[in-house]
Image (cartoon, helix red, strand yellow):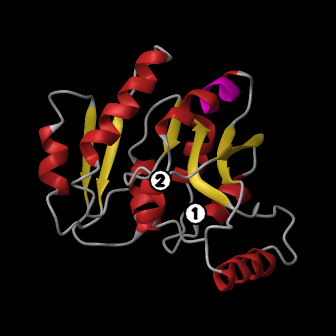
Amino acid sequence: PCYNEAKNIERLCQEVDQVFKKIAVPYELILVNDGSQDDTLAVAYSQIKRYPIKIVQLSRNYGKEIALSAGIDHAEGDVTVIIDADLQHPPVFIEDFYKHWQAGYDMIYGYRVSRNDEPFLKRCFVKFFYGLMNIGQTRKITPNTLDFRMMDKKIITAMQAMPESNRFMKGLYSWVGFTNIGIPVDIPEIGRASCRERV
């Protein structure tokens, strides 16, 4: 998902390309422009000749959940990675995700080791939120998980078939099931400055 990410698109493409060249796997980068007000779309198109990019243009800003769903709907690979365009999710972790996928895991997700950099009240809210969301649930949402994750094609196929229009993606990731494992991810300062991760 991309929202006003003109300053980050080129670097994102470079870093993603470096990772996939290292693991020697062909890829397609799907950029979902979520109604950006800056030059995100123009910068994305400027990178098409350098990288294997598909651009999905939404008619307005629908928000991250819809943008993620649009990207998933266009995913066709054997495995799909969800990553934010603002670089709060370091692409270098994709290599670790891929190794775990090769080992047999269907979903590999990143999680925050600590939220100590956030205000006390926000940390309390996040703890309350996950506690509330998990009441009575057999498939619980793991706290501090990120949208940054790798999913096998069978998970993508299952999510593409879901009819929900108002989506809470982290809830759907948990609900869909399959084997999964979490990987600790350190969010760099550049990502914290522009962080749009909700909880």
* Amino acid carrying mark 1 in the image: Met
Q: Is residue 164 above or below residue 85?
A: below
For the N terminus, the quadrant is bottom left
x and y percent of residue 21 in the render? 41, 17
Distance between the Cα atoms at labels 2 and 1?
18 Å
Disc 2 designates what residue?
A: 88
Mark 2 or mark 1, which is nearer to you? 2
Residue 28 visible in this rendered orientation of the protein: no
Outermost residue toward the top in this view? 24
* Amino acid carrying mark 2 in the image: Gln
Residue numbers of the magenta segment: 97-101
Disc 1 designates what residue?
A: 169
x and y percent of residue 165 in the render? 48, 71
Quick check: 50 left or right of 177? left
Q: Quadrant of residue 120?
A: bottom right
For the C terminus, the quadrant is bottom right
Residue 150 visible in this rendered orientation of the protein: yes
Whichever of labels 2 and 1 marks the residue nearer the N terminus, that label is: 2
Judging from the image, what secondary structure is the residue with disc 1 in? helix
Q: Is residue 174 above or below residue 107?
A: below
Q: Is residue 23 above or below residue 128?
A: above
Of the pair 42 and 105, the residue shown nearer to us: 42
